[in-house]
Image: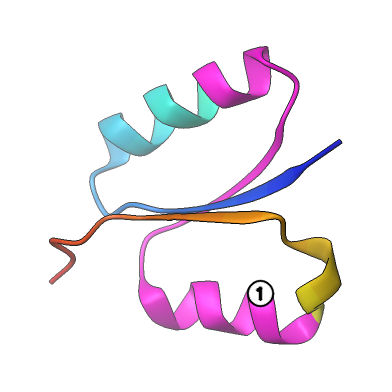
Amino acid sequence: MAHIILVEDEDHLSKGITFNLQAEGYRVTAVDNGTAALELISADPADVDLVILDLMLP
C-alpha cells in the first residue's frame, strides 16, 4: 500500500482529503506543517511514496 504524507494546515481540508485517499486504499499520514513532514520523511525516506503539500502554508 502506498504511503502518502499530506501537509495541510486547514483541518477540514486535511480530514476530507485523508478520508478520500484512504477510501482509495492509500495509507495517509496528515501533518499541519512542513517541519513535521520533514521529520517523517527523514525518519524513513523509503516509507514515503508521495507528498501532497499545501503551497499556502503559513
Residue shown at 66% from the left, 76% from the top: 41
What residue appears at the point 86 percent right and 36 percent down from the top-left corner? 1
What amino acid is labelled 1 in the image? Leu
Q: How many marks?
A: 1
Residue 8 location (% of width, % of height)? 33, 52
Q: Secondary structure at mark 1?
A: helix
Residue located at (61% from left, 83% from top): 39
Q: Indicate whether 2 appears above or below 44.
A: above
Whether 12 is drawn above or below 53: the answer is above
Give the side of residue 13 with respect to residue 5, left or right. left
31 in magenta: yes
Highlighted magenta segment, given as a residue range = 20-43
Residue at the extreme top: 23
Label 1 Cα neighbours within 10 Å, binned few <14 / some 14-19 / many ≥20: some
- Left or right: 3 as drawn, with respect to 1: left
Q: Position of residue 9 (x, y in %)?
A: 27, 54
Quadrant in which the C terminus is drawn: bottom left
Image coords of residue 16 (percent x, y): 39, 23
Question: In the depicted view, which residue is nearer to us: 33 or 24?
Answer: 24
Give the colour scheme shown: rainbow
Asked if residue 34 is positioned above or below residue 30 in the image, the reply reads: below
Query: Considering depth in this image, is 8 or 46 the residue closer to the camera?
Result: 46
Residue 14: image quadrant is: top left
Q: Nearer the viewer, residue 9 or 23?
A: 23
- The answer to whether 41 is drawn above or below residue 13 in the figure is below
Residue at 18% in and 66% down = 57
Looking at the image, residue 39 sits to the left or right of residue 57; the answer is: right
What residue is pinned by disc 1? 40
Residue 22 falls within the magenta-colored stretch = yes
